[in-house]
């Protein structure tokens, strides 16, 4: 009950065509105190998403009218960075990487652990929980992490590079914020999984690698030879500021 109290009530859109599984997932979402709406195909999911406000999308991949990843691709193309959790029977390593490259924040293969699913929902919602409007209005440059051309404003969930906004997923932002708050310190994949993804499962190492690669691409500067996020071979990753 304490975990539910720490998270605001969210509205979650579930896109799943298996009726029995959808009912089970919705039951566990409601058990966490959240609202849920279920759709069973891509077209209706996009339509409903544009009509209502949702805090999280939970997508199946094998839908009657296409791949659930198509929904994620479309939203990311429009610079919509709502958290997306894929829950699918397509659980090979390459399929997970494909999902992460599409901009998915988390990827759980079926069959899945209910406790793990609930934990990952909590984790994604916690990363994107809204602050009161008055608090956002009071946010100023003093609340930003400033590294010259790179500016991170946690209160607004905003990153800019050379004064141009950089759209990041919830996971990408959490990873960047974590590393940027500890410049120069090297973290292993296991440490990043624990602190950013709240898991100690080594099977998700590829998730760290994919997210690091996406961040590097988004923060890349053609004229610069070095990256903000650097690999320390055989050890892990670190944030190297350039001020």
Image (cartoon, rainbow, N blue to C red):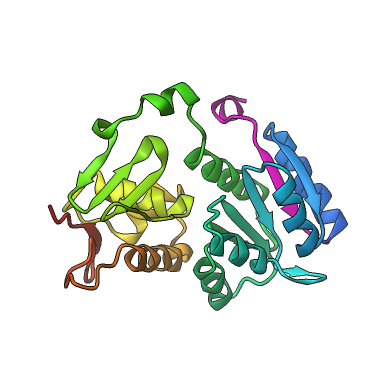
Q: Quarter of the image holding residue 118?
A: top right
- What x and y, as percent, mark residue 80? 55, 54
Residue 114, how many percent across, how many down?
67, 48
Q: Is residue 194 visible?
A: no
Q: Is residue 70 left or right of residue 139?
A: right
Q: Judge whether residue 46 is colored magenta.
A: no
Location of residue 26 with respect to 90 vertically, above or below: above
Report the side of 225 relative to 80 (left or right): left
Location of the N terminus (image quadrant): top right
Which quadrant holds residue 156?
Answer: top left
Q: Nearer the viewer, residue 59 or 198?
A: 59
Magenta range is: 1-16
Kindly give the residue lying farthest to the left in the view shown: 243
Q: At x 68% / y 65%, what residue is drawn?
A: 88
Residue at left offset 17%, top offset 69%: 226
Which residue is most to the front?
163
């Amino acid at each position: 009950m304490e975990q539910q109290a720490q998270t605001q009530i969210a509205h979650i859109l579930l896109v799943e065509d298996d009726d029995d599984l959808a009912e089970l997932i919705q039951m566990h979402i409601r058990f966490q105190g959240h609202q849920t709406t279920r759709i069973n195909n891509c077209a209706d999911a996009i339509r409903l998403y544009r009509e209502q406000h949702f805090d999280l999308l939970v997508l199946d991949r094998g839908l009657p009218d296409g791949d659930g990843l198509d929904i994620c691709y479309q939203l990311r193309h429009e610079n919509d960075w709502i958290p997306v959790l894929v829950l699918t029977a397509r659980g090979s390593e390459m399929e997970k990487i494909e999902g992460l490259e599409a901009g998915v924040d988390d990827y759980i293969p079926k069959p899945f652990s209910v406790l793990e699913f609930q934990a990952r929902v909590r984790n994604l919602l916690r990363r994107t929980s809204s602050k009161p409007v008055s608090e956002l209005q009071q946010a100023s440059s003093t609340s930003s992490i400033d590294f010259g051309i790179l500016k991170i404003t946690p209160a607004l969930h905003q990153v800019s590079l050379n004064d141009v906004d950089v759209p990041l997923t919830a996971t990408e932002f959490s990873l960047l914020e974590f590393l940027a708050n500890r410049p120069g310190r090297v973290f292993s994949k296991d440490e990043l999984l624990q602190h950013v993804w709240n898991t100690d499962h080594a099977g998700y190492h590829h998730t760290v690698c994919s997210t690091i690669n996406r961040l590097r691409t988004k923060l890349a500067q053609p004229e610069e030879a070095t990256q903000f996020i650097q690999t320390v071979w055989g050890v892990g990753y670190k944030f190297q500021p350039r001020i």
